[in-house]
Amino acid sequence: MPTSDAVLVLNAGSSSIKFGLFEIGASEPALLCKGLLDEHAAKPRLVAKGPSGETLFEKQREASDTDGGHLFADVLGFIEDRFGEGCLRAMGHRIVHGGPDYSGPVALTDDVYGKLEALTPLAPLHQPRCLAPVRTIRALRPSLTQIACFDTAFHHGLSPPASRFAIPGRYEARGLRRYGFHGLSFEYVAGRLARIAPELAAKRTVIAHLGNGASLCALHDGRSVDTTMGLTPLDGLVMGTRCGTIDPGVLLYLLQHEKMSVEDLQHLLYHESGLLGVSGVSADMRTLLASSEPAAREAVDLFVFRAAQEVAVMANTLGGLDCLVFTGGIGEHAKEIRSAIGARLAWLGVRIDAAANDVGRERISGGGSAVEVFVIPTNEELMIARHCVAMLR
């Protein structure tokens, strides 16, 4: 099935990389296949599936084969065998942090790569994972155009006071400000909302991207005007293993009195906190909801409490709330979490229809709700493909 022009999208997570191959059409990029590169399984593996979910290709390497480049070579080999050699026009990457310089997609030149690598201290868990495939692909296909699409770009227009920390201005001049993340997800969901409910496009909307990483975005006229993450992806909501907003005094205490090193503190905040830290059971919301352990319920309650609390903060920025959208792995699939957050926001006029919520309908607001409530699955890979196609054209 030869394909003339296609874009390969990589979305790097902390332990695996999702990918999607999109055909460049006259209008919307069309999904040809999608898959997963799991480099940290017992045996590194690659799975590629068709648009309907049928398995097209699967390969597993030995546990001793720790060179991720082999998995990328497998992906490229599969694509060229199935869709035609030379079909790839470009590769798009989700890059978590674009810093103050990048407000939109950009070709990954050596100069750009160096600037993005320098931002690693602002996203130490994510930035290296996002950039590593760029080097590998450059070695495998040096002539292939690679494009960076940024999670911070959608929030690039944030302005004071929402963009500021209350620290001396000299530090803000050095780039210490609130950037926000999950922008590719928010951008996709905002576009989808405008199509299915155009009457809400200019209204006051909060999108809740709830997953292992979680954040909220306040939208007015389709633009981001506030968000819960700040300089790094560590701020804001309770997440799978990240703490979210925390009293800075806690950090000072751990450094000064517990004698933690900076490295140990970073590991605690990124890998041992959040749902995992509170529950002592799991970072996975599905496991916690199914658990009978009291600590698991406490973790869920804290997650819901903080999410509802921050929705109210976003509503304050907006001067009210007309629409609430759930997305992300938890937002899309955990009906109990949606219901509990809605109940805590009843004072804001949120009413969720239990039957619609249970079956996962797109619109789940109940009769008499002053706020329209939706569940909209996100699609970061498609958003990246759209940006790549726009650049190529």
Image (cartoon, rainbow, N blue to C red):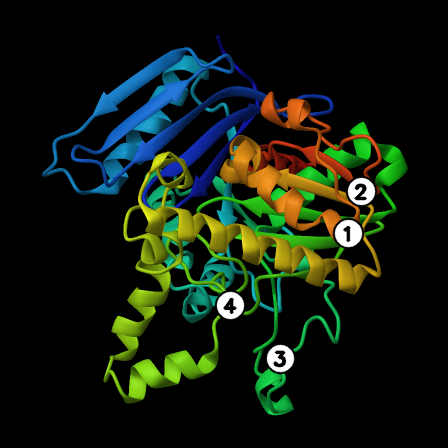
Residue 246 lies, in percent from the top left, at 47, 72
Circle 1 or circle 3, nearest the eye: 1
Q: Which residue is mark 2?
A: 371
Dot 2 or dot 4: first in sequence order is 4
Circle 2 or circle 3, nearest the eye: 2
Circle 2 or circle 4, nearest the eye: 2
Q: Reply above or below: 173 against 199.
A: below
Q: Which residue is mark 3?
A: 165
Pointers 4 and 3 in contact (CB under 8 A)?
no
Q: What amino acid is at disc 3? A: Phe
Q: Residue furthest top?
A: 1
Dot 2 or dot 3: first in sequence order is 3
Q: Residue furthest left?
A: 64
Q: Which residue is mark 4?
A: 245
Identify which residue, 159 or 24, lies in the foreground.
Answer: 159
Identify which residue, 319 or 28, lies in the foreground.
Answer: 319
How far apart are the two marked residues, 4 and 3, measured between alpha carbons?
Answer: 13 Å
Residue depicted at 41% across the width and 56% down the height? 126
Q: What amino acid is at disc 1? A: Leu
Q: What amino acid is at disc 2? A: Val
Residue 207 lies, in percent from the top left, at 68, 46
Residue depicted at 61% across the width and 70% down the height? 178
Q: Reply above or below: 45 against 241.
A: above
How far apart are the two marked residues, 2 and 3, measured between alpha carbons?
Answer: 30 Å
Dot 2 or dot 1: first in sequence order is 1
Pointers 2 and 1 in contact (CB under 8 A)?
yes
How far apart are the two marked residues, 1 and 4, measured between alpha carbons?
Answer: 23 Å
Q: Which residue is mark 1?
A: 348
Local crowd at mark 1 within 10 Å, few (<14), some, or many (≥20)? some
Local crowd at mark 2 within 10 Å, few (<14), some, or many (≥20)? many
Circle 2 or circle 1, nearest the eye: 1
